[in-house]
Amino acid sequence: MLQANGRWHNKAHGKTTVRVKHYKTTACQHCRMKERCTRNPEGRLIERSEYSPNIEANARRVKANEATYRRRQAIIEHTYGIIKRQWDFYYITTKKP
């Protein structure tokens, strides 16, 4: 069973930093598949971001409403592509820092 020690670790991604928890188990030491699963001598380490529940919920929403998201791509993403191509915008910032 995987367990976390309860501490959050900061992991840098470019200019942003994300908090993650590390999950480990002692069962790896006696597992026959250890060589196939990980090269870490202490066993497998799994990181979960503080945003993991949100990412999983979004994936479920997208999967449950595939037709709606395909329609959105056809309407919205096409518009952004036209703006970028015809107005010479190489990127569009839709979020404020």
Image: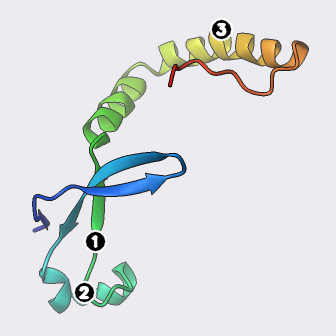
When the figure is inspected, residue 30 is found, relative to residue 69, above or below; the finding is below
Please name the residue shown 86% across and 19% down the image.
Answer: 85
Secondary element at tag 1: loop
Residue 60: horizontal and vertical position, in percent?
33, 30
**Cα distance in 3D space between marks 1 and 3:** 41 Å
Write down the residue under mark 1.
45
**In this picture, is 65 found above or below 55?**
above
Q: Residues within 10 Å of mark 1 (few under 14, many from 20)?
A: some
Residue at left offset 13%, top offset 81%: 27
Residue 53: x and y in percent read 25, 38
Q: Is residue 91 left or right of residue 37?
A: right
- Residue 76's tag is none
Q: Position of residue 59 (x, y in %)?
A: 38, 33
Residue at mark 3: 75
Marks 2 and 1 close (CB-CB < 8 Å): yes
Q: Nearer the viewer, residue 94 or 39?
A: 94
Q: Which residue is mark 2?
A: 42
- Separation of disc 2 and disc 1 at Cα? 9 Å
The reply, left or right, for residue 31 in relation to residue 81 is left
Q: Nearer the viewer, mark 1 or mark 3?
A: 1
Sequence-wise, the earlier of marks 1 and 3 is 1
Decide: few, some or many residues near mark 2? Use Cα within 10 Å; few <14, some 14-19, many ≥20. Answer: few
Q: Quadrant of residue 21?
A: bottom left
68 left or right of 11?
right
Mark 2 is on which residue type? Glu
Residue drawn at x 35%, y 79% is 37
Q: Amino acid at mark 3?
A: Ile
Q: Identity of the amino acid at label 1?
A: Leu
Left or right? Give the position of 19 relative to 92. left
SS at badge 2: loop
Residue 57, given in percent of the width and then of the height, sits at 29, 31
- Seen in the picture, residue 40 relative to 91 is either above or below; the reply is below
